[in-house]
Image: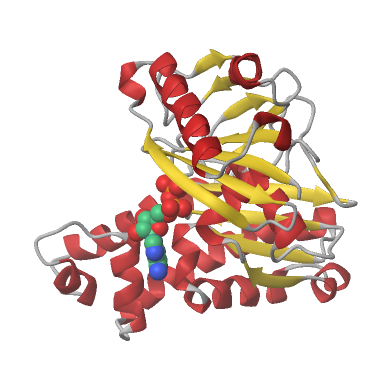
Amino acid sequence: MVKRIGIDVGGTNVKIALVDGEGKIIYSNSVPTYAQMGYEYTVNNIKQAIKDLMKETNTEAKDIQGIGFDFPGQVDCKTGVVKNAPNIPGWVNVPIAQMIEEEFHIPTRIDNDVRCAALGELKFGAGRGCENFVCITVGTGIGSGIVINGKVVRGAANAAGELGHIKLQMEDGPLCGCGDSGCLEAFASGPSIVAMAQEYLKGGKSAKFRELAGDGEITPYIVAKAAEAGDPVAKRIFEKMGYYIGMGLTSVINLLNPERIIIGGGVAECGELLLDPIRRTINERAMKVQRDAVEIIPAELGNSAGVIGASMLVEG
Ligand code: ADP
């Protein structure tokens, strides 16, 4: 039986899973990242988690075909070095693949998180049987993984897929975390939902999401719940989100002519609330030939896309 390890490194936790050749998770566990302790500390915890996984599943290194890592940041897939991961302080130029291979003698590869999610969806999720698609995630930011002719596109410097930085406004647009302005991500992301909600409240008006948040913070999840309960302001916020994302995707669809756009990430958990205005915008704005060929569908692998996709890096 084919067995691989997928490891999804996040700012808070590292998820680790033993995955079979059909994309089924045989065993999973997670350990805290504790990035503030330095990357060596996290790497030691990961090594221990791999040893625990092997012990608890009675698996030896020779039975494991590969180990794959995904990181939320810039990676060099060829050398297996994490260049920079903004949410995991201290992970700058870390040769993680070499460190793991030296310890376990198992082939190890790395990639960024959204491309791993796209690879997972390609092999075992909403991208099965599809040669050309774009998988996007909407959460704190907006990212994408592009699959062309059945292969994940990495680009000249492993940086392909930055859908969140498509420019929606040429001049005087909102500032973006990338240092530029007018990017899709500066208009539509989890934090933009919260900013739109707070802007409305500044006018002194009441809204369902304020009531649902109680004394706590307003989150995209709460704004989605308010919209589902019929709150007109919350509904308008998701309409705008879908409009902005739909406009960004219109350029992608015109450019690449994909069969599917697969939408995942925490904010996309609200389903049709976001998908419906995205589809309407694409129907109104994309070129006819491309728009007739594309379907806009939710991701299937959810939270597990990272570990499942990462586990496939050695094969892919
Ligand atoms: P990150 O980009 O930090 O990895 P996620 O992709 O996990 O984040 O997305 C987290 C965000 O998703 C949070 O802001 C949360 O409020 C939001 N979220 C979770 N569930 C829903 C939902 N059902 N509807 C709308 N937003 C949601």
The number of discs equals: 0
Query: For residue 217, which quarter of the picture?
Result: bottom left
Relative side of 248 to 49, left or right: right
Vertical side of 266 occupied by 13: above or below = above
**Residue at point 42%, 31% (across, down):** 87
**One can see residue 233 in this view:** no
Vertical side of 2 occupied by 86: above or below = above
**One can see residue 302 in this view:** yes
Relative side of 121 to 57, left or right: right
**Residue at point 43%, 17% (across, down):** 39
**Residue at point 42%, 27% (across, down):** 88
What is the residue that sits farthest to the left in this orientation?
215
Q: In the depicted view, which residue is nearer to us: 28 or 307?
A: 28
Q: Ligand 1 is in which quadrant of the figure? A: bottom left
**Residue at point 53%, 50% (across, down):** 27
x and y percent of residue 283 in the render?
71, 76
x and y percent of residue 50 in the render?
52, 32
Colour scheme of the picture: secondary structure
Query: For residue 63, which quarter of the picture?
Result: top right
x and y percent of residue 196 in the render?
33, 59
Q: In the depicted view, which residue is nearer to us: 231 or 72?
A: 72
- Which corner quadrant holds the C terminus? top right
